[in-house]
Amino acid sequence: MSDAWLVGRSRELLAQAQSQTPDPDYLLATSDDLLAEARRRGEPRIVAHLLRAAAVVRLVIPELADLADPKLDEMLTYTRRHGLTVLEADARALRARRALATGAEDTALTEAACALAMFDEELTPDSMSDHRTYQRTLAFALADIGLVLTQLGVYELADQVLARAHVAVREGGGPHEIAVHMLNRVRLLLGWGLRLERVGKYDLANRQFRVAADLATAFEGPFRESLFPRVEGVPAADQDPVVGAAHALAEPGPGHIARLTTLLDHAKYARQLIIVAIALARCLERADQPAEALAVLHRARTEVDGDTSEPTLMLCLVREYARLSGPNGGVRTSGALAEYAAALESELWTMRETKITTLNARRQHERMARAHGAIAQQALQDPLTGLPNRRALDARLAALVSARDSDPLSVALVDLDGFKTVNDRGSHAEGDNVLRVVAGTLRNAVRTDDLVARYGGDEFVVLLPGATLPAAEAALDRAVEAVVDLPAVLSRGVTLSVGVVSLRPHESPSEVLSRADAAMYQAKRQGGCRVIAVAGDRQETSADATGTTSTPRPTTRALPRSSRGATARATPDPDSGTDTAPGTNPAPASAPPAGPAPAPAAEPTAGPTATGPTTADQPDRPSEPDHAGEPDHTGGVHQPDHAEAPVDATELLELGDSAEPTRLLRPVEVADPTELLTAVAPASPGEPPHAGDPADDGAADNGAADDGAADDGAADDGPADDGPADDGGDALSRCGQDRPTAQVTGWKGH
């Protein structure tokens, strides 16, 4: 049982449902079974087609019409969710037909306007369907819209829609689609001709009747090969009421009476009853049987009483009855009816023009609303990756921070390791491809409710509402591993450095992003391809007896490159009392405890540096306020100044898993304003610099595989760093060049 068989079988059911003697129970059960099979397979286009079939079966059979609403609503929701614009417009048209059946003409106008607005857009053919299948789907949707407009009496617009459907049928339709299209055209022309007669345009009306008769003659061929139930060897004019009425209205006469009498007994829908009754009454009038003609019209009025599906044709029936009843009702009755009819026609003509104006206005409104939605989406979307952009990120983060139920909220900042190398060695086009691949991988690694946004350049931000820090850390570990596992031809060797933090109480969006940025750079300093998680709950610092402050060490978790995604958590070293990552060498146990070293003597300078005059040039400069114990923008705590020489500022620097979590940076006076940040020297002469830290991205710390500038000591005013490869120094160099902080230059660690 193929997908094509399911769709073909649904078309057969629709043809049977519109026959004169349908079997409601069989059609209902069979259509539901086909829909269940389509849902089991899960292909969106097949499910949408079968939803349409189930809805139409209920819609066209009067006793099942009340069951159509849930299927129509489901079809509209499903097609909108899967971006099936043509079938979404079809769902709108079918909902309009249902609204007319319940007397909600204004609702029908709105639904028809929405359907027309969708076809006003430039439709892109469905790449998952072949050309003929797409054109057939297009033809069905346009036919349903044209039928609704015919029922509303807006024949000019209906004619335009069916002309477009004709093109689609010619390119993708078979005999059945051709037969359906020709039958819809006949219905349109007959209703249009009857409407023209009501305003005295008899010549135009007769022209429409003649064209309808010609189409009815041409209908015979496709009808014999269509899916409509029929009696073999019997002409279509003797089996279909509308086709038989078309011949009679073009040339009324006694020769059509027997055929139309039989067709009137088999008429099923209101439009069939009204058209056949009017045609038969005119043939009886030509045969000098006015009483029989009035009886036919009276019967039709009785049978369609209360039916609101054909408001325009209903007025045509009333007018025909008034016209034929005049001679037998006396001059007074005849004159009253004629006068009433004239006033009614004038009013209805005005209402008709109002309908057209309203329809066009609502159509324009829907078109503008859809265009506005597309523009708004573009304004909040990154054009390269398709992810939300910075504007969308700021709005979402602000909403989550201000919401009362935003706790917990984890925020991660993701940066690509080695991305600059991709652009330098390959091309920017390759870099764009890498960004797209990584963006999609990152998006698939988190939950649907999480937001992944492009922050700028090769940085992304992930918002994980409702996720605790361990849960967010695990999700981002999966993302790092997923990028590592990508084929090299897609990733070009890039990996992810991730810093994730948890929102603190009363913390602003900029503050939480700043802490996530600091955690990300800590992951960079430890070699990249890892996740650094910093606990986000606010822990107040407390002063001990000596007046110093202590701060809990942030929890870190790393994902080393050598393990391709395997996580490594810091473990305590029993000898040194510090945490060391697996595979690293702890600092010697004999090393004295680290502490702030005295500042060296300032070097003489000829004048102010690039950042302003030095401390020596400003003897009267007021002292800086004491911020000891207050949290800074990186989540650390300012330390009190115990140095003998005055200082301008202090800054804390996280150094991975070293024995000393923070080091005090002090300003020095430099002659060269371009001096870069240098590596932090160990606190003790016996301590090897960063022993056991993970290797940096580039070999020998020359920036070859780093996304920052090369740090070979050339720009330093001191001796070149000839020690082991120092990932901390390289990270400081990148921080100084790529992400400058607080206008601090020429600083050296002590």
Image: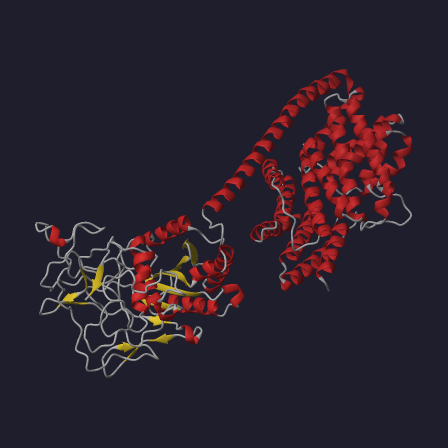
Q: Can you give x and y, in whole percent of width and height, for residue 426 in the image?
A: 50, 60
Residue 540 in view here: yes
- Kindly identify the residue that appears in the image at 61 percent across and 47 percent down: 85
Which of these two is toward me, 521 or 712?
712
Colour setting: secondary structure
How many discs appear?
Answer: 0
Residue 400, quarter of picture? bottom left
Would residue 581 appear left or right of 165 to someone viewing this image?
left
Would residue 667 appear left or right of 427 to someone viewing this image?
left
Q: Can you give x and y, in whole percent of width and height, for residue 193 in the image?
A: 76, 29
- Kindly identify the residue that appears in the image at 11 percent across and 64 percent down: 643
Residue 577, quarter of picture? bottom left
Question: Which quadrant, please, contains the C terminus?
Answer: bottom left
Check the image and report above or below for 591 versus 625: below
Which of these two is toward me, 685 or 660?
685
Residue 463, quarter of picture? bottom left
Q: Can you give x and y, in whole percent of width and height, for residue 634 in the image?
A: 26, 60
Which of these two is toward me, 253 or 403?
403
Check the image and report above or below for 444 versus 377: below
Q: Can you give x and y, in whole percent of width and height, for residue 126 in the image?
A: 65, 51
Residue 23 in view here: no
Would residue 35 appear left or right of 529 to someone viewing this image?
right
Question: Which quadrant, please, contains the N terminus?
Answer: bottom right
Would residue 677 appear left or right of 698 to someone viewing this image?
left
Which of these two is toward me, 401 or 47?
401
Check the image and report above or below for 285 versus 549: above
